[in-house]
Each structure stands twice: as structure tokens, then as C-alpha cells.
Amino acid sequence: MKVQQLLFAALAASGVNAGPLVGRQNGAFDSPPYYPSPKGGWIADWSVAYAKAAQMVGQMTLAEKVNITTTIGWSQGLCVGNTGPVDRLGFPSICAQDGPLGIRFADLITAFPPGITTGATWDEELMYARAAAMGAEAKAKGVHVLLGPSVGPIGRSPDGGRNWEGFGSDPYLQGVGAFESVRGIQGAGVQATVKHYIANEQEHFRGDGWAHNTVSSNIDDRTLHELYLWPFSEAVRAGVASVMCSYNMVNGSYACSNSKLLNGVLKDELGFQGYVMADWLAQRSGVEDMLAGLDQTQPGDGESWANGKSLWGDSLSRSVLNSSVPVDRLNDAVTRIVAAWYQLGQDVNYPPVSFSSWTTSDTDVLYKGANTGPIVTVNKHIDVRGNHAEIAKAVARDGITLLKNVDNALPIAESDTIRVFGSDAGPNPNGGNSCVDRGCNSGVLGMGWGSGTADYYPDISTPIAAISARAANVQSILKDDVTTAVKQMAGTANSKCLVFISADAGERYITVDGNEGDRNSLYAWHSGDELVTAVADACPNTIVIMHTVGPIIVEKWIDHPNVKAVVNAHLPGREAGSSLTEILFGDVSPSGHLPYTMGKAVSDWGSSVALVTQGSGKMDNEYTEKAYIDYRWFDKQGIAPRFPFGFGLSYTDFTYSDISIETVTAPSELPPARAAKGATPVYPTTIPPAFEVAWPSDITTRISKYIYPYLDNPSTITTGAYPYPTGYTTTPAPAPAAGGAQGGNPALRDVIYRVTICVQNTGEVTGKAVPQLYLEFPSGIKYDTPIRQLRGFKKIELAPTEAKQVTFELTRKDLSVWDVVLQNWVIPGAGAGGYTVHVGDSSRNLPLSKKTTV
């Protein structure tokens, strides 16, 4: 063993902070301590922002620092999250607003397709364009922090309620979505917040709102790094301003209290320079969470909504004065928040917040949460949409995935006799915005439900309206129950019968049709299977269109001889009809590919990923499948899916040929050691004078439920010996090998192999191909690895007969595994016989294979 390896192994064995994420104690998972919280500011790309932040923070009083880290309470400002301002220094109240597909609680905005549809495009340029448009709208509305993208959950369980907010059930695909989304949002000058960190894989017992019945996601160190952490590291590599920690426990510690995950993995190993924000009411303690690396709590209230009681606020002021929270830790938390504001250029001509999350009236009281204060203008109705409907339509359209097309049933013609069935084809009969946070499945399903939605939905393009505008002979029954009328209309001679079905899911605080966030089953809602079967029994040209949050089981009708075509339109957002008709009528060839696997039975996904739906207290959810989720599990178990991950048909045909591999850099087992960290801001560490948090004389009326930093009689507080957590020191102990830049060791991005292929359109219409590269690790290595892992994709448009060369670059990280002893990324294939590169159009159709020679 090399000297460097021996050193790492000795450090890990000795229990120094270099150790792995988990160990076993009395048969249970345990998350080790990692202290103190590493300081931000040592990355060159953030140096200017940190210098400005240090100058401002150095002038702040203790009360002003607490204001910025605590936030002022639910509904006390215009946004879902609001910091206290520091008016005398020019630092505003920072507005944080949902979400990952558009601005929640605002009008005249665009409801974009969710992440799962965006992932289904397999198009990096569209991922970026969507995010850039969302960022532009957020800035124009005065939002400083857009709470997205979401890459957690990753989709471990196919019935997880919020899977649709992310980009798909693969870390590489999610990672590309995260990277491009952060670039797009922040390119517009808005802070992005990647969430939910980490292993937040189900809604049942997620532990929100101070619920003590909480699932603990118990994950080994290697699985966390290679699967769940991967997309977060890509967001950090893109320079993300904020990371939101989740409600659930991880290895027995709440995610927002987990020092190993926040201090060790995120701030040290990944070099994260922004700030850690708690999900709303996900903070679980005061002093301990601050020490563990939490920088900002939201929405300020601590144990329940809008109760005016905070775990920080005046308690944080007290904790600093009595020395239980070191001044150094508070300074770093505040500096991280202020630096993010400077980093995105929000100190120059940033527009004020122009909408209210709490009322649609033009004017209202200033402090809505207390129902008091002067009457002010709260909604200015600024239209920020621009041409973003076209971007939304492009994402929805290019995510549409054609799963079956027998006898060229699609595309249909405008001269066809068209019959449309199912409520999913029409509008919500009660109005587009009749369900708060989309908490219903009525009319066309454009997105799931919960805080990750957008409310401005009155102008949705419905399928029935868009189809009727294109064809003259269209009749419809927009109901889901099978009636005599349905059967009679479906039996119309030579008709094309379009059956619309859906499956919904969302966040736990809303229950829809008995589904408490997570789905109760993987079948279509509203008796969709029965509707399809009834129509198909009568109509020889039945076409099924699905709007769904994730995989559904289609075995009851998929092999019906009259079901000629199946279209998965995912969740299209506002352009549901306009995007779909371009595919149905052949204006554009479908080019979406599945961002998840569609199995034939629930059991296909394995028993270990089943949701925990019963229990109390801390409920352990053992991730025994490790990295084997979705297609990796199907491959390992030899299970034939109904439709594999990455699958998608087209109206044309593509051939793949001429694979070649060039060795760019000779692979070495270990990357070079991390570079030394740069300088970080330095402040006095003396405890500030108590009068800095005394109630100011000019506050004569205290706003009810508003979170203040002030204390009565702060001068009576004395310092004392605080029992700091086990392992707490005053000297940082960084991971010895990983780290060194945003996203980790910069050497992980070194290109090792360059793979080139040729793709040709051999069909008769223009279409977009999605070549996908899957990597097979060498046999005989000591690490268990999935049979194949996605490590690259491209989307290219080709005219008939046109051919293009496509190049993929495989990096050191692509070729590596995480070694829990060395606490480093290791290339196990260096000198072990080489890797096998597979390229094709899905995880199960890979016509090209070639082995590396080094």
C-alpha cells in the first residue's frame, strides 16, 4: 500500500474527521461528528464576494447578524422566507420563494414543466434555457433566492411523492439537470437553492413540522457518495448559493443537525461556499444545529407554523452571549449569506419584491402574519413572462416519450375522425387555480402538488382545446367512468381514439384522493386502466396518452391488440395541449426518453425500496439495496422491464456506428492531493457587548409573532462552560484527500477517455436522437459495481440521411468509486483490464461496445 494510502487508512481507523459517513454501533447506523464547521471564502471564484461580505459583516451588531440567520417568521414578509434587513448598511430583507418549476404564489408568471419532464428531454440546452427563464422571472419579481432545483429525492422508491420535482432516477442525469439549472438560475442573477439534502426519499414520516415520528435513511458511505450526493456535488460545482437540508434523519441524525453531512461532506469535501438553509421547520435544535453547520433557519418559527417562537432569534442572541455558540461560527454563517448576495450581484439595482404570498389583493397590512401594520401595496401585478411560454412548450414537447407505435398509428392527421376520452384531456371544471398548491387531480395534470408548484395557471393549454383547434371532426367525453356513451363513441368507424389517463403525487401536507403525498399504488388514477380497456375493446385505433409523476404499471392493457400507440407526456406544465399536438399531428418527431424505468409489477423494484408507512418514533429505513435502484436493480436481478430507463421511440430511425476510444490522460488510481485552502475572513472572536441585543428604544410596539433578535435584560447573561458535542475542537480537521474546489477535488474533472461515435438518421423525417453512454467497470476488481451506469448523453437533431459525430468525455470521477477507508475517489480499473463502454438509445439497447486499452 502506498504511503498516502497508509496515512488515509490510519486516519480513518483513528476516528479523525476523515472517517466514513457511518459506522455500526450495537447493530444500528451512526453518523459520526465533524467539527468545527469549515469557514467559507477560500475559493478564488468567491473571493471578491467574501471580501465585500467581510467588510459589511464586520460592521454588524449581534442583533443584525441574528436577524439574517434566523428570518422573521412565517407570513411576516411578502415571501415564504424573509430575513431581517440591515438598513443602516444597505442589506435588504432577502426574499426566498418556491420553487423548482416557477414562482409560487405569484401572478403573471410561467408555470414551467417540472424537473421530471425536463429530465425526459435529455437535453442540456433546454435544461439551461428553462432555468434561465425561471431565474429571469424570479429577479423581475424581486425574488433573491429561488428554492430550486430539486435533486432529492432521486427516485429510490418509484411511488415517492416528490420524485417528479427532480430530473430522474439516476445520479448522472440528475447531476446534469442540477448543474445546468444552477447555471441558468444564477446566470440571471438569482440565488439557486439545491434541495433536499439528503436522502429525502419519501413523504410518509418525513418529520416535518416538529413531528417526532421520523424516518431515518440509513445509508453506507459509498452509496451516499456515488448515488445520493452526486447531483448535489454537481450543483456545488456550478457554484450554487444555497443548499436546503431536509426534514428526515440520516443515519440516526436529523439532516439539519448532521455535522458529518453539513460540515464534513458539504462544506469541506465539496468545498461549498454558500449557506445551508433549513427546510421550513426542519431545524431541530438551537446551538447544536448552528455547530453542525446550519447557517439559516426558515421561516424563523421553530416548532410550529407562525407561532412566533424561534429556536434561534433571541435564543441565538442568548447563546452567543453565554458562549455556547462561538462568535466565530455565527460570523461565518452570516458571512456566507451576505457573500451569496454579493456573488450574484444583488447589491446593485435589484428590484423590490412586487407580490404577496398571502393575498391576491393589491393592498394589505404590512405584517400579514400578525394581521397588523400599515396598509401598503403588496401586489403590483408585474408581467414577467416574456416569451417563456415557448421555452415551456419546447421542454414539454421534447420530453414527450413515445413508448409504443404499431402500424404507424402516430402521427394522426387533421382529417382523421378523432375521439377523445378522459378528464385528463380537459380543463379543471372548477378553474385552473381552484386547488391550493395543485392539491387535486382534476383536468389535465400539468404538475404534482405541494410547495414545488406554481399557482398561476389560468391560461393552461388543454389537450382537448389544442386538438380541437387542429382537427375538424373531434368529439369528446371528458369523464373517466366507463359508460354506454363511451363505448358507443369509441366504436365509431375508422376513428382515432385518444384516451387520457394520469397518476398524481405530491407533498405530505396535502392528501389527494387518499394519497398522503406518496402514491398508494403505481396504477393510473380514476380507473384509468378500465377506461383504456373499454375504449380499446371498441376502437381498433386506440392511442393512450399518460400524464404522470413517474412510472405507472400498464400491464392490464399494454398488449391489447387495439392499443396501437402509447405516449408518456409526463407533466407538461402550462403548455400541455400545445406541446402534445405538435407530436400527435407530426409537426415534430417525439424525442423524449424515459428518466426512470417502467416495470411490470411493484415487486420488480425490490422490497428494500418500499415506503415506510407504519411505525412511530425513529423508524429505520435500511438502504440495503445500496446503489442498486431503478435500472441498476433491474439489471442486477435480471428483471425485464416493460420499458427500460432511457427508452423512447421516434417517427424516424437512427443507427449507431464507428465507436472509438482515445486515452487523453493515463488513469491513475488516486487523484492528486487537494490543494491547501485559501484565506478566509477573520473577525474578532470576543463576545459582543450585551447592549447590542437589548430592545431598541424606538420599538414601542412589538409585532405579534414577529421573530426579533432582542432580549430583555441581556446584561444579566453570563458565560459558562458549554458541553460541546463529542469531537468538537477549535482546529479544523479536513478530509485528507477529497475536496479542494467547489464540487470536490478539481482533478475529478480531468478527462481520461474521449469516446466518439457516429449517429445517422436512416428514416424519412427529421428527428432528434439521444445517444447514451453507459460504463461497465472491469471485472475482478474488489468493489461491487452496477452492471452498467449512465456516464454521458447528448441530444442531436438529424435530417433524413444526415450523420453526425458525437463525442463523450469520461472524467476521473466517471471512472471512480468512493473508497470508504481512503475517503477518496479511486479508479479501480487502472491496470485491471480496462472499462467497457456501451452506447445506444436506452439502458437495454446498446449496439456499440468497446473496451478501453489502458
Image (cartoon, helix red, strand yellow):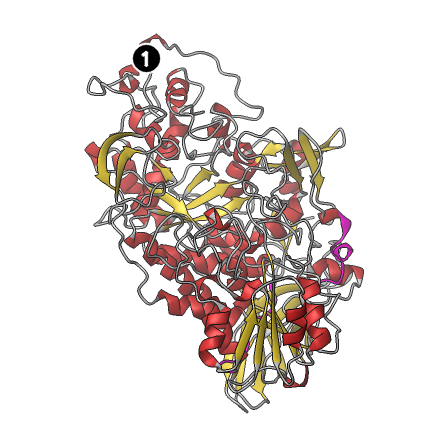
598 in the magenta segment:
yes
Q: Pointer 1: residues within 10 angstroms few (<14), some, or many (20+)?
A: few
Q: Which residue ends up furthest to the top in the rendered image?
A: 716
Q: Say left or right for 87 vs 559.
A: left
The magenta span reads 586-607
The answer to whether residue 853 shows anywhere in this view is no
Residue at coordinates 32% horizontally, 30% vertically from top-left? Answer: 371
Depth check: give the residue in front, 34 or 629. 629
Dominant secondary structure of the magenta stretch? Answer: loop
Q: Which residue is mark 1?
A: 712
Where residue 146 sits: x, y (%)?
39, 49
162 in the magenta segment:
no
Where residue 443 sits: x, y (%)?
52, 60
**260 to 138, vertically: above or below:** above
**149 to 20, vertically: above or below:** below
Where residue 595 sits: x, y (%)?
60, 63
| Residue type, mark 1 in image | Asp
Q: Quadrant of residue 760?
A: bottom right
